Image (tube, rainbow, N blue to C red):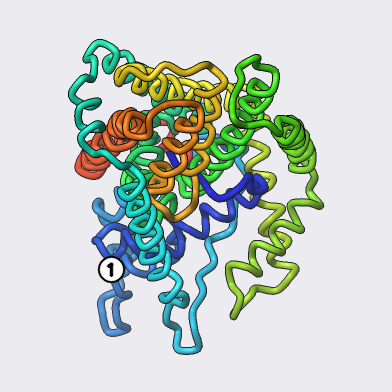
Amino acid sequence: MSADQGPPPLVGAGLAADGILAHSGGPDSAGISAPGISAPGRDALETPPAPSAAAPSDAAPSAAAPSDAEDLACELPDADPDLPEVPDPETETDDCGRPAGRARKVARVVVPLLIGAAAIAVVAGAAGDAGAMVRALRGVRPGVIGLALVCEVVSFGFLGLHLRALGGPGANVRRLAPFRIATIVFGLGSIMPAAPAEGLVMAGSALKHRRLARRRTVLVLGVSQFFGTTGLYGLAALDALVVVISAHDGPIAARWLLLVGGIGTLLVLAALAVVLTRRRFAELAGLIAGRLRHLRHPAPASERRERGVVWHDAAMHVLTEHHKAPWLLVTILLGWAFDGGCLYFALRAIGVHVGLDVLLLGYSVSAAASFIPFIPAGLGVVETLTPALLHLYGVPLETALAGLLVYRALGTFLPALVGVGALASLRFQKAPEELPEEAAERAAA
C-alpha cells in the first residue's frame, strides 16, 4: 500500500493528486493520455483542422462534428449533477515552453533506488546465518500461509469497498471498477520507483480510458490517499496505546513516550478533521500548495486561493453525501487490520509466536516504513526495521527476516502481480457502454 508523506490536508490531497496526474508525463510517453489533460487541450489535439475559406460551405458541419472514435475518447459527465466543477490542472513550463522539473523527476527515481540498495546491504550484513533463514523458509506451514492469503484478499476487498464509496452513483462505479483499481493503486503502485505517484498515474490513465470524469478520478484517488495515510497513523496511535496498557515485559522501558505519542497523534488527527471543514483553511492550503508546486512560475495568489476553495467544496461534497466519511474511515481501518493479520499468520507460518502488543508494534513500524514516499514499498527500510524490532523481543533475526519475507511475498508482491493483470484488463477492455442517463447528461452539457 502507498500514500503521501504524513497526513496532508484533504484539499491538499486533491491538489496533490491533480498535480501528479497533470505533471507525470509517464502515460503520455507510453501512448496513454494522463487524466489531467483538460478537455480543451484534448479537443485541440483531436479536432480536425477547420476547412479553408475556399472549401464548400457544406463541409463545415462535417469538420466541426467529432467522429465516433473522438466521441468515445471523451470523458462522460459525472453521474452526480451536484458535484462541483474543478479547474483544469496547472502546468509548469520554463521560458521556452518546455515542461519544468525534469531533474526532480529523475531524482524521484534514482534517490529511492539508492536508499533501498543501501538498506538491503545493511540487512544482508546484519542477517548473519543465511542458512538459518533458508531452513526457516523450508519449514513454512502451507495451511497457515493460506490463512495469511485470505487476510490479504479480505484487506483488498475493504480497500475496494472504500473506493466504491468514493465513486458515488452507480453509473460512476461501473466505470471506476473499484476492486481492480485498488490492486493498481495499493498493490502495483506501491512497488514502483516513484511510489505512490506512478500508481495514481496508472490508475488515472485506466479510468480515463473508461471515460470516468476527470474531477471524479482526482477526487477518488486523492481522498483515498488521504484516508489511507491518516488511517495508518490512527491505527499506529492505537497500537502504541495497546503496547502501553499491555502487561508484556519488553525492551521499551520509556513507555510514557508511546503514551504521549499515541494520545498526541489521536488529538492531532481529531483537530485535523475539524480544521478541514473550514473554507479559510482551504484557501490557505491552496495558496501554499500552488506555491510549492510552482516555485518558478506561481499563479496569482487569488487564483491559488480559489483553486483551494473549489477543491475543498468538491471533496466535502463527496464526504458529506450520504454521510460517507465514517464508512470511508471504517473500510480503510479494516483494510489495514486485515493486512496486519497477514503479517501475523506469516510469522506463525515460520514458527514465530509473539504477543499482540509486539505484533501491533511490528506492523505499525512495517506499515509506516512502507509509506515513505518515493521508496518502492519501503524496500530495504521495512526489511531493516521490522526484523530488528522483533529481535528486540527475543525473535532470532534470521527467523524474523524469513517471516517478513513471507509477508512481503503475500502482502506486497502478489497484489502487485494482480495489479498488473488488473491494469491490462482495464486498458484493453472496452469501456462500459454509455447508459441512457449518461447520454442525456452529456447532451445537456
Residue at (43%, 47%) from the top-left corner? 381
In this view, which residue lies farthest toward the top?
143
Where on the picture, by quarter, is residue 287?
bottom right
Residue 243 occupies quadrant:
top right
Quarter-of-image position of residue 262: top right
What residue would you read off at disc 1? Answer: 58
Residue at 46% from the left image edge and 42% from the top image edge: 385
Q: Tell me if residue 278 can be seen.
A: yes
Give the side of residue 173 with respect to residue 143, left or right. Answer: right
Using the image, determine if residue 353 lies above or below residue 238: above
* Residue under the image location 28 percent in, 57 percent down: 32
Image x and y of residue 324, in percent: 62, 25
Give how far across and how far down residue 410 sits, in percent.
30, 29
- Compared to residue 17, the image places residue 43 above or below, namely below
Question: Neighbour class for label 1 at 10 Å: few (<14), some, many (≥20)?
Answer: few
Closer to the camera in the image, 63 or 25: 25
